[in-house]
Image: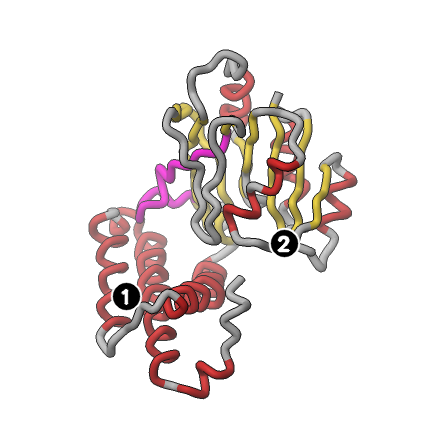
Amino acid sequence: MITGNIITLNESKNIVECIQSLQSVCDEIYVIDSLSSDNTVELARQHGAIVVEQPYLGDGIQKNVVLQHAKNDWILSIDADERLTPEAIEEIKALDLTSTSFDAFAFKRRNYIGSRWIKHCGWYPDQCTRLYNKNKTRFADVKQHASVKAEHVKLLSHDIIHYSFENLGQLFAKPNRNFSTRAAKIMYKKGKRANAFSPFVHGLSAFIRKYLFQRGFLGGVDGMTVALSAAVNSYLKYAKLLEYQRDPKVLENEDFNKVW
């Protein structure tokens, strides 16, 4: 049997459909909640999930909290804004997890903006390992961009869905508000430094990678927009790092103990 795992923070819009998606293949579901201020916890419990309230520890560390509680060897970890497709559900049901030689199974992930599946800019196939044997592997204990590191992984044929952003406004607002500041803080704490050219060079490089090398130009307006968003995010990350270096007042007012 399989234990479902979802980490949450204020996911009342998503949590019910996410739990329902997992219920097709999981006999227990854990929601590891980072002290939500909305009714995420209430909704999760109403729909049969076991809730563990845990202040956020960082991506991989938070996803590994379930290992202390899960009764099953196999863990299926998805985010609140992700769903299993009906085809993926049937493929998971057909797996023989008791005798498989694989440590984990990976999916291709379809990333959406609104109802639009973004197939370029490196957004598809966005391969991610989500079903794994806890006795053989786990998420890396890192605070950002965590992934399951397994030696024997099989890529399944069917996809999971990721409702990445509700609209283009979120595409620009979320990374620019959260990710770039977080990344700049982490780089500064690690001793990395920027110069006056760094924001421009990294921003331009991000755009070229997304739009040309990852064929964003084939995605029309959405491809251009995703590439621009990546450029802005990269630009801001290094601009903020440079600001920490050159403006003592900004540095003094920033709390580096609250990166997360």
**Residue 3 horizontal/vertical position (percent):** 62, 29
Dividing the picture into quadrants, the one containing residue 48 is top right
Residue 119 drawn at (x, y percent): 35, 42
Q: Is residue 208 shown in magenta?
A: no
User: Taken as a whole, is the magenta stretch helix, strand or loop?
Assistant: loop
Q: Which residue is mark 1?
A: 203
Q: Position of residue 120 (x, y in %)?
A: 31, 45
139 shown above or below 213: above
In this picture, residue 110 sits left or right of residue 231? right
Q: Is residue 94 depicted above or below 247 in this figure? A: above
Q: Secondary structure at mark 1?
A: helix
For the residue pair 105 and 122, the one nearer the viewer reads as 105
- Report how many numbered discs are placed on residues in the image: 2
User: Between 111 and 46, which is closer to the camera in this rendering?
Assistant: 46
Q: Determine the secondary structure under disc 2.
A: loop
What's drawn in magenta, residue-wise? 117-131
The foreground one among 115 and 143 is 143
Using the rendered view, name the quadrant where residue 44 is placed: top right
Report if residue 128 lies within the magenta region.
Answer: yes
Query: Of marks 1 and 2, which one's residue comes earlier in the chain?
Result: 2
